[in-house]
Image: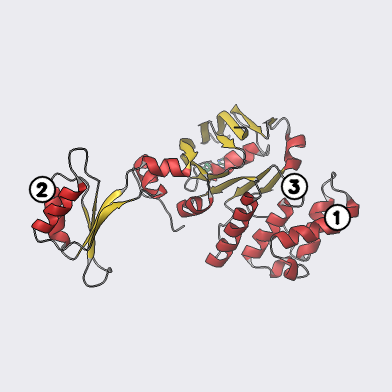
Amino acid sequence: MTAVIETRGLTKRYRGGQLAVDGLDLTVPAGSVYGYLGPNGSGKTTTIRMLMGLIEPTSGTATVLGEPMPQSARTVLPRVGALIEGPALYGFLSGRDNLLRYDAADPTADPATRSRRVAAALDRVGLTGAAGKKAKAYSLGMKQRLGLAAALLQPRGLLVLDEPTNGLDPQGMREIRALVRELAADGTTVFLSSHLLDEIEQLCTHVAVMAQGRLLTQGPVAELAARARGRLSVLTPDTARAARLLVSLGVAGVTVEDGSRGEGGGRVTAEPPGEGTELSDLNAALVEEGVRVRGFGVERASLEDAFVALTGEGFDVAG
Ligand SMILES: Nc1ncnc2c1ncn2[C@@H]1O[C@H](COP(=O)(O)OP(=O)(O)OP(=O)(O)O)[C@@H](O)[C@H]1O
């Protein structure tokens, strides 16, 4: 498999002494939608700025589309569509005129076909109807889509999107996510940073998890989630009794969630039992004890479970 982005020991220490990225080894396979996940301040933007040749690494190497960065920035960057820290737009110009300016700034873009390229890009992001409006009248989501249109003026081998849904309302988020899915379906490799775990789970085939400048893990999303163990879940109105019994049977991590499940129902979750204990025996023991069981099973592990297992802490999934 060819890597579209590869870094080895990539490190950035800012002048003030802050170690923002620490010995990063990333491998982004061709055709992947690669989620770069980490809380604010974990080094995502710094990494992207190094990949795009905007800042020099302190040490380590990076290749993008097979060429070393920042040395090959001039040949690599025209093949990369990037949306970093919000698009730079002229508010007093229409959406269309903003794109015409972007296209004109690209020395490789043929002026004869400019208006056709711009029309196609506007259509791609669903802004044809609003193309004549001034950009300052655009919603944040429309501005973000216009930024994406600028990134799509030329065919690209790679799209790099830094927190593309940051600050958007739910509708705007849905629009941008739908667009990213469409682009990915066309086979474009997408590298997308986010601090939203559910966004990565919805959009990405691969994920790298960052914390404090260091890579905790990377790989296919499905593999990462599968590595985490699911939770045993018992739906019952008799939560306290169920919990006591599970604890007495040696089940670990027993947690009671009461309330809002209708008819006074609640839920008890726990770690799935280890070898030697059958799930069916646990269920039978609950029933024997007179616990009314409305649901029983092991829920599939989510990426969040995997993240908690990795870091020992929860994640800001709501943003
Ligand atoms: N120009 C700079 N000079 C000094 N320190 C910096 C600079 N830019 C970022 N940092 C620090 O480097 C660390 C990583 O920042 P970075 O912006 O890369 O993180 P991030 O994961 O992108 O977070 P956010 O989503 O908040 O941008 C932070 O501690 C930040 O304060």
Q: Report, in whole angstroms, how far the alpha carbon at label 2 lies from the one at label 3.
A: 62 Å
Question: Residue 300: image x %, image y %?
Answer: 35, 50
Residue plotted at (14% across, 60% down): 240
**Which of the pair 137/255 is nearer the observer?**
255
Mark 3 surroundings: few (<14), some (14-19) or many (≥20) residues within 10 A: few
Q: Report, in whole angstroms, how far the alpha carbon at label 2 lies from the one at label 1.
A: 73 Å
The quarter of the rendered structure image containing the N terminus is top right
- Determine whether label 3 and label 1 are within 8 Å by CB: no
**Which of the pair 157/16 is nearer the observer?**
157
Mark 2 surroundings: few (<14), some (14-19) or many (≥20) residues within 10 A: few
Determine the secondary structure under disc 2: helix
**Which of the pair 159/220 is nearer the observer?**
220
Question: Residue 134: image x %, image y %?
Answer: 75, 68
Q: Report, in whole angstroms, how far the alpha carbon at label 3 lies from the one at label 1.
A: 14 Å
Determine the secondary structure under disc 1: helix
Q: Earlier in the sequence, mark 2 or mark 1?
A: 1
* Residue that carries the numbered disc 2 in the rendered image: 248
Closer to the camera: disc 3 or disc 1? 3
**Outermost residue toward the left in this view:** 289
* Residue that carries the numbered disc 1 in the rendered image: 114
How many numbered callouts? 3
Callout 2 amino acid: Ser
* Residue that carries the numbered disc 3 in the rendered image: 155
